Amino acid sequence: MRETRTPGVRTASRLSRLTAVLALGASVLLSTPGPGRAAEDPLPDIPDYQAALDAVKSTDALNAVCRFLAAPVPQGGSETPQTIPDKAEPCEGMPTFTIKDPLALNELTPGFVAGTSPPVAVEAIRLGYLVSSLSVTVNNRQATVILAPTQGGGWHLAAVREGDSDAAYAAKAGVGSLVFNEPQVRGWYELRLLTVKPLNDQAREALGGQSSVSLSDYQKLVKARYADKLPGSDYDTRGMSSGYGTAREPGDTTSSAPLLIGGSGTALALAGGAFLLFRRRRATTG
């Protein structure tokens, strides 16, 4: 005998199947490698990845790192111009090293910070830069090569930074998770499902000592900290600070001349064969 269902039963059955389909779809999406997963995959989910590989393996990138390492580590944030000898062979006399494959440096989207985008991963996080550290320490120093997206597609050398913390944290991303940073507090976080976990002391402090928060609660925190300081805001246009900064701080330019960033809040700008030491503007919250 054929079973007869009432409209209410049929509706409940359809809703149950829909819920199951949505749950399955979410699990598939979360198991798909995101832009932060470059450590394990030979072909990570990064646009124009071959162009990124070509950029970090290029002679220009190698020479830029050698010039950077030839300069002393900046001390005290001096703004005095410093002349660095420009050798015809920048890597001459340097220990042999290579530049590792690039990893994703993710950042918060302006819409997420402003509170106008929903607290979901695809709306909260975007790929900002790519970072590559060195295969070995060179004269007891490490460095990170930063690639910026080129207008129209591809990647170009944007900066060389002292140390390898950016790449070390970026490498912590795995299947179903994204790693991103909050540069204003120098905090690094892992986003898994809808949970934000701190990866360093600065991030834990920014979360008030909590071991994790929901993405929704994290959005409330960053909105309170930065929503009124986004580029174009009154706070920004009045020159009270550099506004809300993202990973695009190293210059956000398509120029082929890289910005060489040192330690202690200073930077080395590459212009032809000369280096100019200047203080970086830091984004503040008050």
Image (cartoon, rainbow, N blue to C red):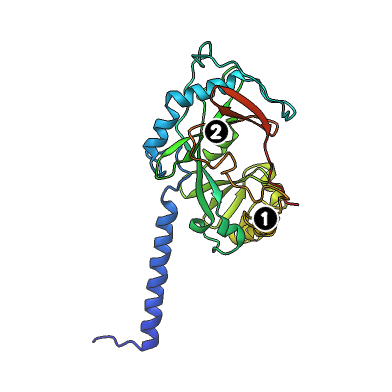
182 to the left or right of 10 = right
Q: Is residue 246 left or right of residue 32?
A: right
Q: Give the x, y percent position of residue 191.
A: 55, 51
Q: Amino acid at mark 2?
A: Ala
Q: Is residue 163 at all visible to an observer of this figure?
A: no
Q: Nearer the viewer, residue 221 or 241?
A: 241
In the orientation shown, which residue stands out farthest toward the top? 93
On the image, which quarter does residue 112 sit in? bottom right
Question: What is the number of the mark on residue 283?
Answer: none
How many labels sit on residues?
2
Q: Are marks 2 and 1 in contact (CB under 8 Å)?
A: no
Give amino acid for label 1: Lys
Q: Name the residue at 36% across, 83% down.
A: 10
- The label shown at residue 159 is 2
The x, y position of residue 161, in whole percent, is 59, 31
Q: At numbered mark 2, what does the secondary structure look like: helix, strand or loop?
A: strand
**Residue 22 vertical position relative to residue 161 in the rendered view, above or below:** below
Residue at the limit of the structure toward the left, as seen here: 1
**Residue plotted at (49% across, 19% down):** 97
| Image quarter hosting the N terminus | bottom left
10 Å neighbourhood of mark 2: few (<14), some, or many (≥20)?
Answer: many
Where residue 50 appears, as percent x and y from the top left, is 37, 36
Residue 241 visible? The answer is: yes
Mark 2 or 1 closer to N-term? 2
Q: Nearer the viewer, residue 140 or 212?
A: 140
Q: Secondary structure at mark 1?
A: helix
Q: Residue at x 56, y 16 (%)?
A: 86
- Nearest to the observer: residue 121 or residue 61: 61
Q: Which residue is mark 1?
A: 229
Per the model, the C-alpha gap separating discs 2 and 1 is 25 Å
Q: Residues within 10 Å of mark 1 (few under 14, many from 20)?
A: many
